[in-house]
Amino acid sequence: MKTLPALLFCLLLGACASYEWRHPSDASANFDADSYQCQTDAAKLYPPMLRERTLHPPMYYPPRNYCNAEGRCNWTTGRWEPAETENYDANEMPRRELYQSCLKAKGWLRIRTK
């Protein structure tokens, strides 16, 4: 059990890490220009594709009879809880992967700074 707190600490510490892109061999490299070109290329191949996913389906809660210690009872009415959905971009992951591989192809390295 002593390893669990240490493992959680390491996970939290890793979640706080920050990264930046650096070009090791070319001091005159322009990250903004390369980044813009890579983003544009990735967006052309993987444009935003919005999809909807269901987080939980609709649920019906039937009427129930609640009684207290004194024997007084109350009925609740049945009710429907609607489904919970969210929108997401189905192309976000491949677009990000293409962007990062494009920068790497141009010589950029993603370096951990913290």
Image (cartoon, grey):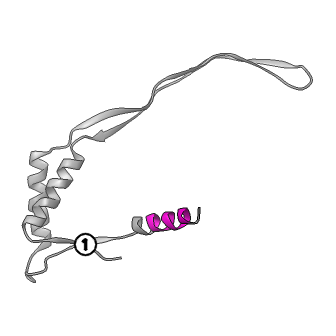
> Is residue 77 magenta-colored?
no
Mark 1 neighbour class, 10 Å CA radius: few under 14, some 14 to 19, many 20 or more:
few
Tell me if 68 is positioned left or right of 58 in this view: right
What secondary structure characterizes most of the magenta part? helix
Q: Which residues are magenta?
A: 3-12
Quadrant location of the N terminus in the rendered image: bottom right
> Is residue 11 magenta-colored?
yes
Tell me if 111 is positioned left or right of 5 in this view: left
Residue 100 image-quadrant placement: bottom left
Residue shown at 28% from the left, 34% from the top: 51
Tell me if 102 is positioned left or right of 111 in this view: left
Vertical arrangement, residue 43 with respect to residue 88, above or below: below
Find the residue positioned furthest to the bottom.
27
Front in this rendered view, residue 96 or 7: 7
Residue shown at 63% from the left, 16% from the top: 62
Element under disc 1: strand
Horizontal and vertical percent position of residue 90? 24, 40
Mark 1 sits on what residue? 20
Three-letter amino acid code of the residue under disc 1: Glu
Vertical arrangement, residue 108 with respect to residue 102, above or below: below
